Image (cartoon, grey):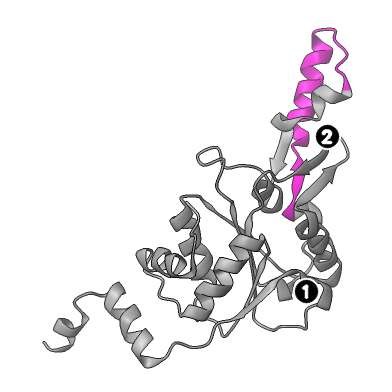
Amino acid sequence: MLPTSIDQTLSLLEKQQYFADRETATVLYLALRMQRPLFLEGEPGVGKTALAQAMARALGTRLLRLQCYEGLDAASALYEWDYPRQIMALRLAEARGERPEQQSLYHDDYLLKRPLLEALLPDPAAPNVPRVLLIDEIDRADEPFEAFLLEVLSEYQVSIPEIGTIKATVPPLVFLTSNNMREMGDALKRRCLHLFIPLPEERLERRIVAARVPDIEERLNR
C-alpha cells in the first residue's frame, strides 16, 4: 500500500529500520505521487542504496538493481534474446519438417529481461504495486547510456522491434544514485526529483545503531 502522507512515509520507512529526516520523507512521497525518478546524492555509506531497499521491502516487492559501469549499453540494461534457445527451437522445427514463423521465435519465452525492462512489467506477486528500481552509480555510465535512460524514464516505455512497444501500467519507483564521479546531464536531472542525503547527525546515528544492535549499551558497559 502506498503512503498517503509524509508522516505515513516516515512511518513506513521506520518499520523497515530506515530512519529518515522529514526532508527525505517529503521528497520520497512526492516522487511516489508525481511518478518521478529520485536522484540521490551523498557520500558513500549515507544510506542511498538502503533507502531503495527499504522502500522495496515496505511495498512488498523485489528490488531490481542495475549496477552502472563504463561501457554499459542498452542491451545489458534492457533485454537480450535467448539465441541458443531460439536456434534449438528452429532446429527442432526443421527436424519435424516445419517452417517456423518469425513471430514464433520472437516472443516472451525467448526474451531475457534485464532490470530496466523488468521494472516496466508488473510484479506477478503484487501487480498493482510499483516496481522499485535502483540504478546504482549512474555517474559511472557513459553519456550515450544516460541519453538512452532519459528516453526510457520520460515515458516509462520501451520499443522492442520484434514485439512492439511495452509501457508500464504502473510506473516504477526509480532511484538513481551518484557519487559525483562526473557531472550528470541537465536533462536527466530535470526529469528527476533531487535529494542530497547528508551524513547523519549524532542523535540520528544513535537511533540507527540502537535499532541495528539493540543491546549495544549493555555490550559497551561490560
**Nearer to the camera, 45 or 86:** 45
Q: Are marks 2 and 1 in contact (CB under 8 Å)?
A: no
Determine crowd level at label 2: few under 14, some 14-19, many 20+ residues with C-alpha closer than 10 A: few
**Nearer to the camera, 89 or 204:** 204
Percent from the top left, x then y, of residue 138? 70, 71
Quadrant into which the C terminus falls: bottom left
Q: What's the residue at 37%, 92% (across, down)?
A: 202
Q: What range is drawn magenta here?
A: 77-101
Percent from the top left, x then y, of residue 134? 61, 62
**Does dot 2 land on a helix, a strand or a loop?**
loop
Quadrant assignment, res 209: bottom left
Quadrant assignment, res 29: bottom right
**Does dot 1 land on a helix, a strand or a loop?**
helix
Q: Which residue is mark 2?
A: 163
Left or right: 201 with respect to 111? left
Gap in Å between the C-alphas at discs 2 and 1?
A: 31 Å
Percent from the top left, x then y, of residue 18? 41, 71
- Residue type at mark 2 is Ile
Can you name the residue that lies furthest to the top here?
97
Numbered tag placed on residue 190 in the rendering: 1
Q: Check the image and report above or below for 48 versus 75.
A: below
Q: Earlier in the sequence, mark 2 or mark 1?
A: 2
- Residue type at mark 1 is Arg
